[in-house]
Image (cartoon, grey):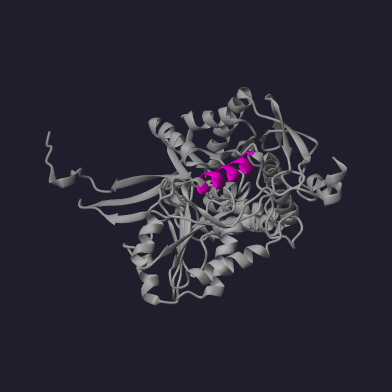
Amino acid sequence: MSKKIKDFGIEKTLKNLGIKEENRGTSVGGKYFASGKTIESFSPVDGNLIAKIKTSGESDYDKVIEMAEKAFKEFRLMPAPKRGEIVRQLGQKLRQYKDDLGKLVSYEMGKSLQEGLGEVQEMIDICDFAVGVSRQLHGYTMHSERPGHRMYEQYHPLGIVGIITAFNFPVAVWSWNTALAWICGNVTIWKPSEKTPLCAIACQNIMNEVIKENNLPEGISSVLVADHEIGQKLVDDKRVSLVSFTGSTRVGRMVSTNVAQRFGKSILELGGNNAIIISKDADIDMSIIGAVFGAVGTAGQRCTSTRRLIIHEDVYDEVKNRLEKAYGQLKIGNPLDETNHVGPLIDMDAVNMYQEAIKKGKKEGAKFIVEGEVLKGKGYESGCYVKPCIAEVKNSYEIVQHETFAPILYLIKYKTLEEAIAIQNDVPQGLSSAIMTQNLREAELFLSQAGSDCGIANVNIGTSGAEIGGAFGGEKETGGGRESGSDVWKYYMRRQTNTINYTAQLPLAQGIKFDL
């Protein structure tokens, strides 16, 4: 470990989580192996090497699938409340390792320490939620049209659930899928982002403790740190019943097509282009806080980040001026320092996309009231720190129609609420949306059939920060998938209709006669 890492106190964190200088990227229960190339994980915080990982190869993939298939045959027979107990124990382990895992998330991904800890808290919350659901995997009973018959529906596990996650939430999204998949009786194989592999290895190390302590089949939880070719194998493999994919719309379209061609199931969590409508009847203080956090939290690298502010003309200048003042007070730097508001982008590719988006915006006519720039000098040695910026635009600009994973906020003026809703909906994505208003009629219109077309619609809170109790996901090019709370558990199961005849006759449905 480099001296710089020791200075940040990361060395102890890595040791506590079982992360070594050289790691094996394939983990099944307590077994670690890998036959692929070696990759390196660098921190965007300071640009330093954290650790090396020998990745999973094709032979490793085949071995993991075989172990998962074997584990499923045993795990599916365990009563659901007993599987819930396993998830409860995982939640307890996460409480034990919360500080270390949250710190690793912050250091490897670059989000603030508070957001890293918050992400681990999401994992704990979904475990608590799933434990309760494990006793409520209910079907339906209905009346048969035939006398002496009973008819009902029940749910059965699917089998292997493949989970492909993105760098921006390197641990929470895995837990959303895993906690529910397990209580339903499935086994999981996780292919994390190559940009945050150590977070995945740490999570698997924690789960390995639960597997060992309960003498569980090792294949119920597997991690494959690998390149896109292994991800493609998960997508194309008929033995993988469900693929949950979080990432870009471009890749999600391919995942959806390939999984559908083999009649598999998919859950897609793709891009967002989220807007807050600020009404003339809004609480402006509240609106500024919600807008700024939504736009700069995680350095704009959330799928629910606020990309657009649609502001009523009567309060437009006030909001614009207050935003400009608020941005001037932002502290940008090491996310492990809790006095800083904004950390780095994930890597130089993200920095280049940020710069290109600003260039395209200006070419289309965007007027930047807070200029963006790549920060240099002491504390910014990684080259991944950028200044959050604000631009006045038209919603029709091509760059505004796309999601840029960076802290760029677009301002748009409106006259009527109907116009504002139309502007908000006039993008290809449909993930998260919000309105700031103290007018009940405006709030209800925004939530009505004539209102937001997004999967998430909020009143007087921002676009980011969803709770696990509600289903998370969006419409249109966001993919239509749902994860986390509500009745999402049904995505991880197959539905079966059962009819039992307890008479000595065999009447047919619809009154059909078939006498021999």
Q: Is residue 307 above or below residue 78?
A: below
Q: Is residue 126 left or right of residue 446?
A: right
Q: Is residue 478 left or right of residue 25?
A: left
Classified by dominant secondary structure, the portion drawn in magenta counts as helix
Nearest the camera: 472 or 458?
458
Q: Is residue 449 above or below residue 79?
A: below
Q: Residue at x 20, y 52 (%)?
A: 145
- Asked if one can make out residue 223 in the rendered structure from this viewpoint, the answer is yes
At which x and y percent is residue 296? 61, 57
Q: Is residue 133 above or below residue 428?
A: below
Outermost residue to the right: 3
Q: Quadrant of residue 447?
A: bottom left
Q: Quadrant of residue 164?
A: top right
Q: Residue at x 31, y 62 (%)?
A: 450
Q: Is residue 374 left or right of residue 1?
A: left
Magenta stretch bounds: 349-362
Nearest the camera: 184 or 431?
431
Looking at the rendering, in which quadrant would you find the N terminus?
Answer: top right
Nearest the camera: 281 or 457?
281
Task: Give the total of numbered labels.
Answer: 0
226 drawn magenta: no
Q: Residue at x 67, y 42 (%)?
A: 204
At which x and y percent is residue 375? 71, 49
Q: Is residue 414 above or below residue 427?
A: below
- Asked if one can make out residue 178 in the rendered structure from this viewpoint, the answer is no
Q: Residue at x 55, y 54 (%)?
A: 81
At which x and y percent is residue 124? 63, 57
357 drawn magenta: yes
Nearest the camera: 36 or 240?
36
